[in-house]
Image (tube, helix red, strand yellow):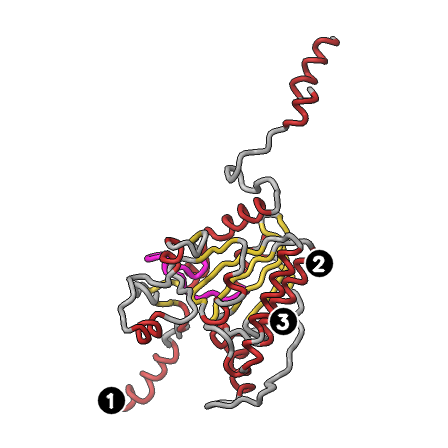
Amino acid sequence: MNWITNYVRPRINSIFSRREVPENLWKKCDSCGTMLFHRELSDNQNVCTSCGHHMNITPRERFNALFDGGVFAEVDVPEPITDPLKFRDQKRYPDRMKAAQKKTGEKEAMLVAAGEIGRTPIVAAAQDFSFMGGSMGMYVGNAIIAAAEEAVKLGRPLVLFSAAGGARMQEGILSLMQMPRTTVAIQMLKEAGLPYIVVLTHPTTGGVTASYAMLGDVHISEPNALICFAGPRVIEQTIREKLPEGFQRAEYLLDHGMLDRVIPRTEMRDELITIIRMLMNLPPQVVGDLPAPEPAAAEEDGNTPEAAASEEEKAG
């Protein structure tokens, strides 16, 4: 018995060892609890195929789905001063930054890129909620200014995807200063006559909502996104009243005139193509979006193909 236990069984186990299954093959939907295969979820842009719940998505994943062929060029963002307040709570601020960079693989909470969408050149900026809650600090302020300057320089519209818990407390007043800075940057676009489109994603709160996230020419949101300054729990505790169902969610804001559209993530690219080309006074890219322009000038001059054919017949 000892021979079987000590020699044969380990040999069998080593030959027929169980395969290790990676932990990230399946992901559970936070809304309905459905287990989703990672590849299927990725192909659907991190939207649950069962209930339509929109999960977090990184800026790179978003840009891969947004730009033609997933091709884009990153726009350089000036580096701000590192930890000017020498802030420390349970951890040092630089340590929190390093942990966030390791977790996300990104340098900071916003990515700026230039590329084409539906063959229309644009500049886009997207916040990463996975990076310290997408909080707005000096780098995010610099990123929005860089995006606006790039858009003005190239004569392109700016599309911004917001996702943030507000200003970054570790930078104190320097983070709050980004509210007027970004407001001035958006004004540059308006003075240049360039469209500024904001896509508000879950969640967009605090100083971000109070500044650049609500200054767009068009405001679009993903379904059920929380969009507010102070959260519903804080408001309920302050006014000591129960808020209505769905308060501060995208659909509620759409019904009350705060948003122009609520569009699922998988349909966002087509919607943006339509809106951008309308605002840029370009013909529709997708057949059926808008009626084709009528050749009025050619008809007035009699220079239509039909008229030319008729003249040839008469000459013959």
Of the pair 131 and 38, the residue shown nearer to us? 131
> Which quarter of the rendered picture does the C terminus lie within?
top right
Kindly identify the residue that appears in the image at 50 percent across and 37 percent down: 288
The magenta-colored residue range is 44-60
Of callouts 2 and 1, the N-terminal one: 1
> Which quarter of the rendered picture does the N terminus lie within?
bottom left
Query: What secondary structure prevails in the magenta region?
Result: loop
Is the Cβ of the residue at disc 3 closer than 8 Å to that at disc 2?
Answer: no
Q: Could you tell me residue 218's position as x and y percent?
A: 51, 53
Kindly identify the residue that appears in the image at 54 percent across and 54 percent down: 217
Kindly identify the residue that appears in the image at 32 percent across and 84 percent down: 8
Q: Which residue is mark 3?
A: 142
- Which type of secondary structure does the marked residue at label 3 adopt? helix
Q: Which residue is mark 1?
A: 1
Give the number of the disc on residue 286.
Answer: none
Is 45 colored magenta in this rendering?
yes
Which of the two discs, 2 and 1, sits closer to the camera?
2
Q: Which residue is mark 2?
A: 153
**Label 3 to label 2, Cα distance in Å?**
16 Å
- Which type of secondary structure does the marked residue at label 1 adopt? loop
> Looking at the picture, which amino acid does disc 2 mark?
Lys
- Which type of secondary structure does the marked residue at label 2 adopt? helix
Q: Could you tell me residue 141's position as x and y percent?
A: 59, 71
